[in-house]
Image (cartoon, grey):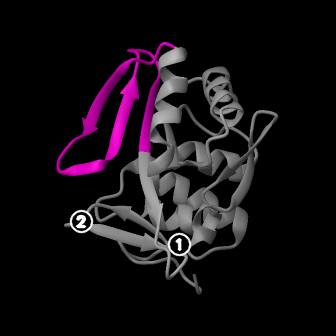
């Protein structure tokens, strides 16, 4: 997705009052303060209760196709219009702990609120995004793609973080 499309969608979602955070490759670039590569999509972390509002924005923008995430992950949706693609990552607060739950009844993960409290810029637009340490963790899957390894290296260099020595390993230091 090109910068102008990302900025337009982010501004429209902000104007609707949706609480969200940018994720994925655009979060890495936001944290670094500049676009370092081309992106095929925009990842957004959105509270489950805000799904209707965010989908309304996308429909107004002409993004009218919704696909479930491949596999059994009903908390992930892909919305697109054939040109622009947004991966929605739905989460909800766990009241007692104050953490976020990402996933469904059969499979879920939890992470602290701080994971989505990073601050960065996309072009000249200030955005909330994944924090550097958590963006590193989210990129560090069991089978990271080359682009994920590249993004992790950039985050580590910029923020003085340790590069995980094996896939799926949490980043060095405390979370």
Rendered location of residue 119, percent (x, y): 74, 55
Rendered location of residue 63, percent (x, y): 45, 18
- Image position of 39 (left or right of 34): left
Query: What label sits on residue 19 in the rendered view?
Result: none
Q: Residues within 10 Å of mark 2 (few under 14, many from 20)?
A: few
- In the displayed structure, 85 sits above or below 49; it is above
Label 1–label 2 contact, CB within 8 A: no
Depth order, front residue of 51/154 = 51
Please state which of the two labelled residues, at mark 1 or mark 2, is closer to the viewer. 2
- In the displayed structure, 95 sits above or below 54; it is below
User: Magenta span has 99?
Assistant: no
Residue at position x 56%, y 60% in the image: 153
Principal secondary structure, stretch drawn in magenta: strand
Rendered location of residue 31, percent (x, y): 70, 53
Number of numbered callouts drawn: 2
Depth order, front residue of 25/69 = 69
Residue furthest toward the bottom?
174
Q: CA distance from mark 1 to mark 2?
A: 32 Å
* Start-end of magenta stretch: 62-88
Q: Which residue is mark 1?
A: 163
Indicate the quadrant where residue 64 lies.
Answer: top left
Q: Is there any visible trace of residue 40 in the rendered image?
A: no
Depth order, front residue of 54/35 = 54
- Mark nearer the N terminus (1 vs 2): 2
Q: Residues within 10 Å of mark 1 (few under 14, many from 20)?
A: many
């Amino acid at each position: 997705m090109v910068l102008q499309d990302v900025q337009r969608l982010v501004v429209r979602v902000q104007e609707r009052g949706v609480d969200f955070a940018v994720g994925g490759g655009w979060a890495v670039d936001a944290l670094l303060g500049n676009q370092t590569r081309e992106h095929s999509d925009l990842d957004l972390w959105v509270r489950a209760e805000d799904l209707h509002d965010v989908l309304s924005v996308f429909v107004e923008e002409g993004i009218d196709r919704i696909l479930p995430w491949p596999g059994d992950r009903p908390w992930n949706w892909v919305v697109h219009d054939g040109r622009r693609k947004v991966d929605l990552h739905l989460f909800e607060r766990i009241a007692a702990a104050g953490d976020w739950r990402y996933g469904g009844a059969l499979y879920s993960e939890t992470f602290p609120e701080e994971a989505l409290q990073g601050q960065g810029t996309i072009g000249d637009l200030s955005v909330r995004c994944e924090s550097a340490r958590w963006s590193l963790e989210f990129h560090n899957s069991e089978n990271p793609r080359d682009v994920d390894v590249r993004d992790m290296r950039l985050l580590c260099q910029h923020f003085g973080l340790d590069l995980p020595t094996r896939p799926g390993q949490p980043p060095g230091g405390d979370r």
